Image: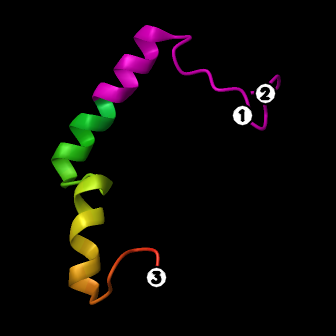
Amino acid sequence: MHSERTELENLAGTHGGTEADLIDQYEAWAATVGVIDWADLETQLPASWGIDDLHG
């Protein structure tokens, strides 16, 4: 943390095992709590909010 406090350098892909483990943990948690993918919501929200699209 001391060498990269602002986290400007993208380290994805540099620690394959750790990255894969974190992704697996997130996906397991997301399935447990019912996280809905943004791509799915993006098509449903405008109609439920009574607007044409999410950008205005």
Q: Quadrant of residue 29?
A: top left
As drawn, 3 above or below 37: above
The CA span between labels 1 and 2 is: 5 Å
**Residue pictured at 74% horizontal, 33% vertical:** 8
**Of 2 and 36, the residue lying toward us:** 36
Principal secondary structure, stretch drawn in magenta:
loop
Q: What's drawn in magenta, residue-wise?
A: 1-24
Residue 23 screen position, x and y as percent? 35, 28
Q: Is residue 2 magenta?
A: yes
Q: Residue at x 64, y 26 (%)?
A: 10
Query: Could you tell me the amino acid type at mark 2?
Result: Glu
**Dot 1: few (<14), some (14–19), or many (≥20) neighbours within 10 Å?**
few
Q: Mark 1 touching mark 2, by CB under 8 A?
A: yes
Determine whether the residue tagged by mark 3 lies in a helix, strand or loop.
Answer: loop
Element at badge 1? loop
Residue 34 magenta-highlighted? no
- Identity, as a three-letter code, of the amino acid under mark 3: Gly
Residue most extreme to the right:
3
Mark 2 or 3 closer to N-term? 2
Q: Residue at x 22, y 36 (%)?
A: 28
Circle on res. 45: none
Residue 38 at x, y = what percent?
32, 56
Vertical side of 33 occupied by 28: above or below:
above
Label 1, on which residue?
7
Distance between the alpha carbons at the discs numbered 3 and 1: 32 Å
Residue designated by label 2? 4
Q: Disc 3 or 1, which lies upstream in sequence?
A: 1
Q: Which mark is residue 56?
A: 3
Q: Residue furthest front?
A: 52
